[in-house]
Amino acid sequence: MAEDILHEVTQSEYKYGFTTEIETDIIPIGLDENVVRLISAKKNEPEWMLDYRLNAFRKWKEMKMPEWAHLKIPEIDYQSISYYAAPRTNGPKSLDEVDPELLNTFNKLGIPLEEQMALSGIAVDAVMDSVSVKTTFKETLAEKGIIFCSFSDAVEHHPDLIQKYMSSVVPVTDNFFAALNSAVFSDGSFVYIPKGVRCPMELSTYFRINAVNTGQFERTLIVADEDSYVSYLEGCTAPSRDENQLHAAIVEIVLMKNAEVKYSTVQNWYPGDKNGSGGVYNFVTKRAICKGENSKVSWTQVETGSAITWKYPSCILQGDNSSAEFYSVAVTNHHQQADTGTKMIHLGRNTRSHILSKGISAGVSNNSYRGLVRVGAKAENARNFSQCDSLLLSDKCGAHTFPYMEVNNETAIVEHEATTSKISEDQIFYCNQRGISTEDAVGLIVNGYAKEVLNKLPMEFAVEAQKLLQITLEGSVG
Amino acid sequence: MLEIKNLHANIDGKEILKGLSLEVRPGEIHAIMGPNGAGKSTLASVLTGHPSFEVTHGEVSFHGKDLLELAPEERANEGIFLSFQYPVEIPGVSMVNFMRTAINEQRKYRGQDPISATDFLRLMREKKELVEMDNKLTNRSVNEGFSGGEKKRNEIFQMAMLDPKLSILDETDSGLDIDALRIVANGVNKLKRPDNATIVITHYQRLLDYIVPDFVHVLYDGRIVKTGDKNLALELEEKGYDWIKQEVGSI
Ligand SMILES: Nc1ncnc2c1ncn2[C@@H]1O[C@H](COP(=O)(O)OP(=O)(O)OP(=O)(O)O)[C@@H](O)[C@H]1O
Ligand SMILES: [Mg+2]
């Protein structure tokens, strides 16, 4: 009897979280100046960083959520969210403790074992130690003078660079979500490629392993100095389950003369279940500025996750002869909604931009492309070509295209093409008759359709992304 | 190898096959002729498992297995091949990728490892030669922008690649020019072996000069109403179908 009572008391205490360490590292829900101060304090930030956050917070309070996107966004209560959570400390200890379904997906995607461990939340340090890539990686980069570190580290060790470039591409008040991120950003990455340096490796593997704990308000800044080159990959194909429903990230890229940056994203946040409940809301502001002449930036994205995606990686083509590319595959299934595209702002002479957007919709989802091409008065001979294709897999899904053009220079040439197609029952049957299952047939057709974009991804990820498309659309036809 | 007994099938609630029976043994070539709308393509669709058709009655066994129980891709991997009357275009999917996927699915079904790149390329080359298929075509997406005749030739190329046990050629001759007809028919003949069989659906006796059938069947109003040897095809060419219709009507 006594034992039972004792048991009950201890159990219920445990249930309500009377544990020690974990609790101390979570800020209660809600957002006010004190929370902003607390976040800054927890990260031991200098005064200027705190001032920056407070300024952003004050601006954010006066702003409203944008409503122009073709999205049905449920009311978000910003006071019911916790804005700082320390990395998980009570994750699984080995792969045996991980959800077998998740492991199954990892295997389907062909993700190496070490990364599977990291992605399942097994103590990252332990995993990192077993991955020798990390150290050799860091040494190689250091030799070249490349800085590649967490945003927090950069604030501490490279304050001059951060102060110079942070918000130089995405101003604090750019939009509601950018202001929110600027006030409460958790962490992210900083990259600096010095003059004349070609980054000898994809900045990917390392990042992928670290990506697990970057939190919901991520911030990335990439500065490519004159004549430099870097290819950067964000996110990963593995399904990212996250209890944080709201994600609002910022990515800024600065390119000097002759610099080239390739930024690739594979986004696979939890999309919610088949009935449309749960899932991440992903509101991202990504922008690059080609400051110097002849600089070149490309955004490549494969978007398969999230319940709601609001995302327009953009380019400001300021330097003469600079060029920009946007290659996108956005997949929506079940109840997912995506409103994504790009903005190309031509300011310099002979600037070029190329947009290739491939939307794939299934289930009862909604998939919109929204793009703006603006040619400034001084952008002599600016060129843009946009191709927006939609592929439908069901009769109940939606595909929409919203191209906007503002051309203020007569010598500019701006072209837009759009197509819509549907996978037919006859195409599937034709494949079936050649021995190919419906799932594989959909994979084959979808990957054929998205090929041009997938080919732009770094090799290893192109292969994973292909499989990802197929997995995302499993059971969506027939 | 194929035994069809009293097969009835509907589309959208309308009965098209109305008690069709047919037996095909290894090594045989069967020609099926019959007026437009008789149900010839429907038979091909039902045998290959097209989801639009519903079998309401009857049995089909293939090498002793209940064919109607199998999914379309399983039937294909069991060795049934259909050369479509109207081949489908699949933009974005290259012929090479399509064929490699199909071959590997077949191998997987049979418990074999995927084909090596060199073996695959050798096979492609060999079979392209067999039907005198242009490289330009195999470098394109499946049937995309192919002419009518090119599509038909591509069907026989795929048949050669997949080496089926039972091939059903649904009006493969229509749309082929005279030279192409000879090339495609020669291809079919070269693939003939004692252990495989062919069903040739056609309107024209001409094809049967090249692919000589062991049996000629007349399919009329959802049933096989007459069976003969190759001379039946000559008779049909000469007299048309009216006399058959009358024979059937008088029963
Ligand atoms: N989707 C459909 N809905 C309704 N009727 C259909 C459908 N498909 C086929 N049919 C009908 O089924 C009948 C048989 O068609 P089928 O294509 O099998 O004829 P066929 O013998 O191959 O003719 P042809 O010589 O013209 O190729 C026709 O009357 C046709 O109109
Ligand atoms: Mg027909």
Image: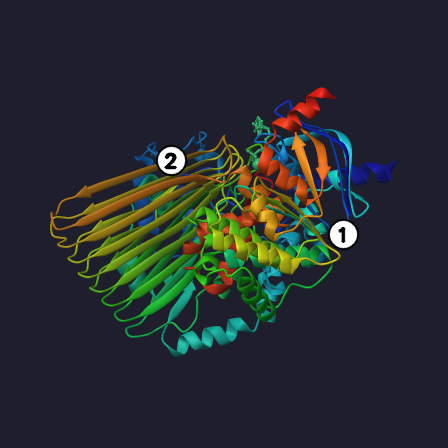
Say what amino acid the circle numbered 2 marks.
Answer: His
> In the drawing, does residue A202 fall left or right of residue A261?
right
Q: Nearer the viewer, residue A135 or A183?
A: A135
Residue at coordinates 29% horizontally, 64% vertically from top-left?
A160
Image point (30%, 45%), residue name: A55
| Frontmost residue, A9 versus B7 | B7
Q: Give the residue at x 29% y 75%.
A: A196
**Chain letter for mark 2:** A
- Parent chain of label 1: B
Residue named by callout 1: B26
| Tag of residue A400 | 2
Q: Residue at x 37, y 41 (%)?
A: A419
Q: Position of residue B162 (x, y in %)?
A: 63, 56
Q: Position of residue A174 (x, y in %)?
A: 28, 44
Question: Which picture quadrant has residue A145?
Answer: bottom left
- Badge 2 element: strand
Tell me which corner region of the image, top left, top right, bottom left or bottom right, holds residue A34.
Answer: top left
